[in-house]
């Protein structure tokens, strides 16, 4: 029996065996991402969130992958392109007041693609619908990557 009802997201899953493959998956999936869109990158440290973001941002035409650096310390990087891309890392953010100082509210009004690493820590404060990319380290260079499409 098919237990999926309409509106239930069915993840699509991929296995990659190198950082380059994960980047390529990001490039490929860029075709399915249109602004305005929030993309949550979910996974532990070293799972490959930034690696995936490099490919996705390149696939969107906003920057070359080599020019995409982790926003761990600067918290937010902005790439002028069509669409405009914001790449955010909330790992070092501890509290909601700190989140407010980032000025995310203004970003949602822009016609941009907003990529967020560690966004699940503040999920109630982030708007939907969103595309969620889950990355899991399966040992060695193997990563299991699930794409959960928006529910609306
Ligand atoms: P995160 O942003 O989730 O902390 P990064 O993308 O910064 O992770 O780092 C992932 C690390 O894992 C990189 O050093 C990368 O070279 C390595 N790696 C090995 N195999 C893979 C893979 N299949 N996909 C992504 N990264 C991989
Ligand atoms: Mg990262």
Image: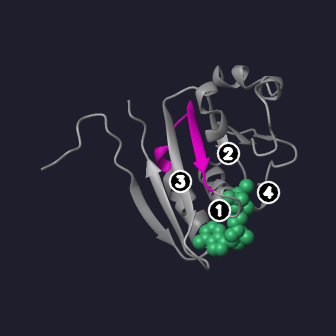
Tell which tag, 4 or 3, sits nearer the viewer: 3
Residue hosting label 4: 67
Give the residue pinned by disc 3: 134
Task: Please tell me how crowded label 4 is: few (under 14), some (14-19), or many (20+) other residues with Cα within 10 Å.
Answer: few
The circle on residue 118 is 2
Q: Residues within 10 Å of mark 1 (few under 14, many from 20)?
A: many
Sequence-earlier tag: 4 or 3? 4
Q: Secondary structure at mark 4?
A: helix
Q: Which range of residues does the magenta coloring cover?
A: 31-43
Q: Position of residue 78 (x, y in %)?
A: 78, 39
Which quadrant holds the C terminus? top left
- In depth, the one of 96 and 78 nearer the eye is 96
- What is the secondary structure assignment of the residue under circle 2? loop
Q: Disc 3 to disc 1, how far (Cα)?
A: 10 Å
Counting other residues with Cα less than 10 Å from the Cα at mark 3, is it few (<14), some (14-19), or many (20 or more)? many
- Asked if one can make out residue 82 in the rendered structure from this viewpoint, the answer is no
Q: Position of residue 32 (x, y in %)?
A: 46, 46
């Amino acid at each position: 029996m098919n237990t999926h009802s309409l509106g239930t997201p069915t993840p699509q899953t991929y296995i990659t065996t190198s950082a380059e493959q994960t980047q390529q998956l990001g490039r490929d999936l860029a075709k399915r991402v249109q602004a305005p869109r929030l993309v949550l990158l979910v996974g532990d440290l070293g799972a490959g969130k930034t690696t995936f973001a490099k490919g996705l941002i390149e696939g969107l035409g906003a920057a070359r992958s080599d020019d995409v650096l982790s926003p761990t310390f600067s918290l937010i990087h902005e790439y002028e392109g069509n669409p405009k891309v914001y790449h955010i890392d909330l790992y070092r953010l501890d509290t909601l007041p700190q989140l407010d100082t980032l000025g995310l509210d203004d970003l949602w009004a822009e016609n941009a693609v907003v990529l967020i690493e560690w966004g699940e820590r503040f999920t109630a404060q982030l708007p939907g619908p969103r595309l969620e990319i889950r990355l899991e380290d399966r040992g060695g260079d193997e990563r299991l990557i699930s794409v959960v499409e928006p529910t609306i």
